[in-house]
Image (tube, grey):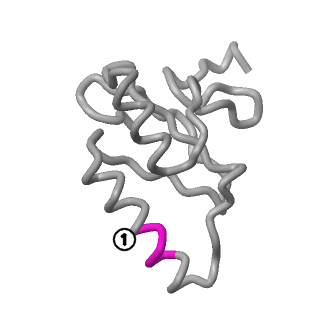
């Protein structure tokens, strides 16, 4: 799955209890994610967001000032990578059989 025209590709699904949210990069969208989506989701599901486990991954097209603003607004940590799943990076091309 490609995350926008010039965004990263997501090559693997995450664990069943993980959630991947995507939005435009602006303060209004972060407000919507934090107040509407996450609060409503938590209220309706009875679950809560783990701030220490939750991360924000920004496209390389997002400037540093906006990254700082959105990270501060959410209180979530920024990361430079989405990490790996079973040892394979979550962004980029899917591995070839010979790579496994």
Q: Residue furthest top?
A: 98
Q: Can you give x and y, in whole percent of width and height, for residue 83 in the image?
A: 65, 31
Image quadrant in which the C terminus is located? top right
Q: Where, by quadrant of the figure, is residue 87 drawn?
A: top right
Q: Can you give x and y, in whole percent of width and height, for residue 31 in the image?
A: 34, 58
Q: Is residue 37 left or right of residue 4?
A: right
Membership of 37 in magenta stretch: yes
Which residue is under mark 1? 36
Q: Residue at x 59, y 30 (%)?
A: 79
Instruction: Please tell me how many numbered marks the rendered image carries.
Output: 1
Q: Residue at x 38, y 59 (%)?
A: 33
Q: Is residue 51 left or right of residue 5?
A: right
Q: Residue at x 25, y 53 (%)?
A: 28
Decide which of 77, 42 is in the foreground and name it: 77
Q: Can you give x and y, in whole percent of width and height, for residue 49 in the image?
A: 62, 64
Query: What secondary structure predominates along the stretch shown in magenta?
Result: helix
Image quadrant in which the N terminus is located? top left
Residue segment shown in magenta: 36-41
């Amino acid at each position: 799955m490609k995350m926008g025209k010039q965004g990263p590709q997501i090559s693997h699904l995450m664990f069943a209890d993980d959630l991947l949210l995507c939005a435009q990069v602006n303060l209004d969208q972060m407000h919507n994610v934090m107040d509407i989506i996450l609060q409503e989701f938590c209220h309706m599901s009875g679950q809560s967001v783990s701030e220490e486990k939750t991360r924000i991954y920004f496209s390389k097209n997002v400037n540093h000032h906006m990254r700082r603003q959105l990270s501060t607004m959410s209180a979530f940590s920024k990361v430079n990578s989405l990490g790996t799943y079973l040892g394979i990076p979550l962004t980029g091309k899917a591995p070839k059989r010979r790579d496994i």
